[in-house]
Amino acid sequence: MRREEMEVDFLAPFLAQMGDPERLTRDQALLLKEQCLADLKQRLIDKANLIQARFEKVRYSTIDSVTSPLFLLLLIILSERHGQNATV
């Protein structure tokens, strides 16, 4: 089914929690709005935390690979060259 043809009622879960009223009072509508916004905010926080965790995992795995003996040798060579250039 194409995306345009799919009808998704994003409010359905929130309305179900309210007992699926046929009409909403102003207070119910405001409550519904607040619940939807709170849910959206929580989902965004969860996604941000997931992205951060993945970033940290990649960052730390990169650090582990960077501390390999070959990389340490490269750092020593570069620091020696830098020291030679600094005294010239």
Image (cartoon, rainbow, N blue to C red):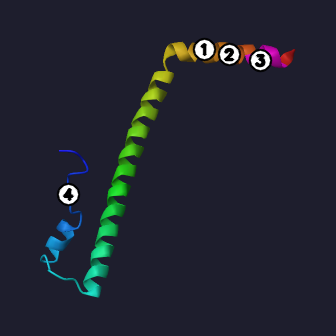
Residue name at image x 39 percent, y 36 percent:
57
Q: Residue at image x 30%, y 68%? A: 36
Whichever of labels 3 and 1 marks the residue nearer the N terminus, that label is 1
Q: Are marks 3 and 1 in contact (CB under 8 Å)?
A: no
- Can you give x and y, in whole percent of width and height, for residue 9 in the image? 21, 63
Nearer the observer, 25 or 57 = 25
Q: Which residue is mark 4?
A: 7
Q: Main secondary structure of the magenta part?
A: helix
Q: In the rendered view, does 5 fall on the left or right side of 34?
A: left
Relative image position of residue 22 (x, y in whole percent)? 14, 80
Q: Is residue 81 magenta?
A: no
Q: Please report the bounds of the magenta region as a residue range.
A: 82-86
Q: Which residue is mark 3?
A: 83
Q: Amino acid at mark 4?
A: Glu
User: What SS does tag 1 mark?
Assistant: helix
- The answer to whether residue 59 is left or right of residue 26 is right
Query: Which residue lies under the disc numbered 1?
Result: 74
Q: Nearer the viewer, mark 1 or mark 4?
A: 4
